[in-house]
Amino acid sequence: MLKKFQDLTLEEHKEILQWRNHPDIRQWMFTKKNISLEEHLDFVHNLDKRREYYKYGNIGVLNFKISDKNIEVGLHKNPYRQNVGALLMQQLLQKVTKYDKKVLLYVYAQNKKALHLYKKYGFSIIAKDKNIITMELQR
């Protein structure tokens, strides 16, 4: 069900881009501008080997940045689907359990829905600044 970005068809890339550029998703991204298809495909082409992006069916996107000490994770849902956060989190946790590393994520402090979801699945706040909260999975 998980499919690496590098293995997606052009139509699948267009679908992900539509989700990512949707205002409900874009507001919580670090890059707020609309991303063009060319920019998206260039991003995928230039992914380094430590960063993995996956399309999870028509549910959403998961990403993992793996370093020596930790794994930074992220996700965003298909904005046209409701109540899929649990499915995304279950896939994310299944993927990171094979590593014996700290699992970190970053979330905007104003994103209350995401904060609630992450806490429900075992993440705790370890740092905050004005806008960004860093959370770690407590195993």
Image (cartoon, rainbow, N blue to C red):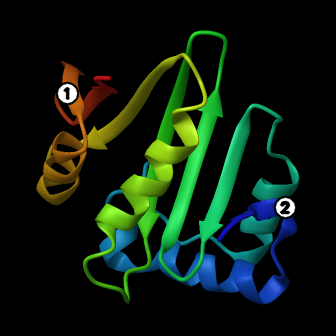
Residue drawn at x 55%, y 17% is: 100
Q: Point out residue 110 in the picture as x, y percentages from the top left corner.
A: 14, 50
Q: Which SS class for mark 1?
A: strand
Residue sitting at x 19%, y 25% = 125
The residue to which callout 1 is attached is 124
- Quadrant in which the N terminus appears: bottom right
Please say if 84 is above or below 65. Answer: below
Residue 88 — which label? Answer: none
Compared across the picture, whether 119 is left or right of 87 comes to left
Above or below: residue 5 compared with residue 116: below
Camera-side mark, 2 or 1: 1
Q: Label 2's element? A: helix
Instruction: Residue at 31%, 65% (x, y): give it.
Output: 85
Residue 122, image quadrant: top left
Residue 123 coordinates in the image, percent (x, y): 25, 33
128 to 48, vertically: above or below:
above
Local packing at callout 2 (Cα closer than 10 Å; few below 14, some 14-19, many 20+) is some
- Of 72 and 18, nearer the camera is 72
Vertical arrangement, residue 97 with respect to residue 110, above or below:
above
Q: Position of residue 71 (x, y in %)?
A: 55, 26
Question: Residue at left 86%, top 67%?
Answer: 7
Q: Does residue 43 show up? A: yes
Badge 1 crowding class, 10 Å Cα cut-off, few under 14, some 14 to 19, many 20 or more, is some
- Label 2 sits on residue: 6
